[in-house]
Amino acid sequence: MKIDNFVLENWLNPACDSEKNKIYLGGSCVSPLTVQELFELTGESMDDFMEELKSMSLGYPEFEGNSRAKAALAKLYKDVKPEEIILCHGGTGANANVCYALLEKTDNIISIMPNYQQFFSIPKSMGVELREVDLLIKDGYRLDLSQVRAAVDENTKAIMFTNPNNPTGSVLTYEEMLEMVEIAKSVDAWIVCDEMYRGLDEEYMPSFIDLYDKAIVTASSSKIYSMAGTRVGWIICHDAKMRDYLSNWRSYDSICGGSFDEWIFAIALEHVDKIFARSREIVEGNKKVIDAWIAKNTKYLRQYAESHGTTYLIHYNFDVPAEKFCDDLLDKKGVLVCHGDCFFIPHSFRMTLSHADDLEEGLRLIDEYMAELEAEGKYLPEN
């Protein structure tokens, strides 16, 4: 099976590891916790943890996933039972599992763009017909649901998207979520939603699993939980037959998760309010700094969406392709942001709101870089 180059992961990950990367502003995970920070934040006993660790078996864990973690995860939703949760190897493992278990060559899917690449490149590689519906940029990356309604038909197996959106952070309103469910019901389609960034709002953020019996949602420990290294992802599905398909695919892919990963993540989940509060404080603090920076650079930059996630997608007015813009910024200034061509959106870059050591120095260096581009005649005044 041939599959597209995974643009985001294959560009960003080597750039992250590069010695050129001095100030990293391209990520999407809230600043990672250390083990010590986790225990200080939660108030759990590090001594008890270390004693339990000494006697931990290095054999297979619970094949259905750590029961403590699943019980805590279920509480993050309105009406989810632990047995409706399938633990996977990270969010990418969860998304891939869903694609392979759900889709067949005779299907079509609706992919709401921009989207995480798994939700269109994997289906395309399987021979599934791909129908794209674009969020409306200058409307704040909002979705015109009439376009979704026009795109579905009796062969539509699923509507697939991220909410909050990656990379813009835009979200569907509750009313829009209900309309999306109504559209899916009209053709008996599944809703498959990557909810990796859900949870940053102060109030409860609805999930599609709350609203529709043919919803499948995925999430992971990576983004707002600050524990990407634990590689815990999950799938939630109410339909027992579909869960059997999903579990079967997981058996082919990974059999089960890691004992330590699921265990330490369970500890975090049992104190999730403290994890979320920390993440909100970090994101809101960085957002204020970046908003002020964009406000003084409106000649060059535009940011259209109200972000409920951990990133902004920022558009720029320079006659430089997005990948080159970011490659040169890294080479010349040591600042890494994620180029918009990773999301097939030209003349843009994704900037973190969530993991930003030396943020203000990084922004100053981007200012230098943009001034140099203007001096080279690359600035494109808006009409």
Image (cartoon, rainbow, N blue to C red):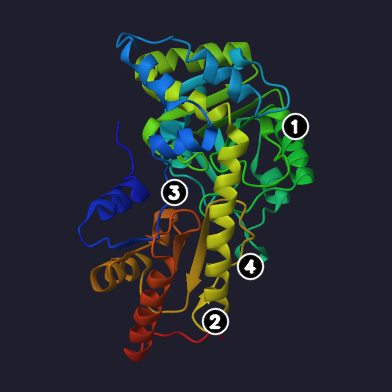
Q: Give residue 204's quadrant in the image.
A: top right
On the question of residue 69 being in view, the answer is yes
Element class at badge 3 = loop
Q: Which of label 2 and label 4 is nearer to you? A: 2
Of callouts 1 and 4, which one flags the residue occurring earlier in the amino acid sequence? 4
380 w.r.t. 199: above or below: below
Q: Which residue is mark 2?
A: 296
Residue 314 location (% of width, % of height): 50, 67
The CA distance from mark 3 to mark 1 is 42 Å
Q: Is residue 155 left or right of residue 334?
A: right
Choose the circle earlier in sequence order: 3 or 2.
Answer: 3
Give the mark nearer the N terminus: 1 vs 2.
1
Q: Nearer the viewer, residue 20 or 133?
A: 20
Q: Nearer the viewer, mark 1 or mark 4?
A: 4
Mark 4 or 3, which is nearer the eye? 3
Q: Is residue 105 visible?
A: no
Q: Say which mark, if any, is on residue 186.
A: 1
Tag 3: residue type? Ser
**Residue bearing mark 3:** 31
**Residue that label 4 marks:** 138
Q: Residue flagged by tag 4: what amino acid is it? A: Lys
Q: CA distance from mark 3 to mark 2?
A: 26 Å
In this view, which residue lies farthest toward the left? 19
Instruction: Establish if 199 lies above or below 287.
Output: above
* x and y, in percent, of residue 118 in the image: 43, 39
Expressed as whole percent of the image width and height from the top left, the position of residue 210 reads 72, 29
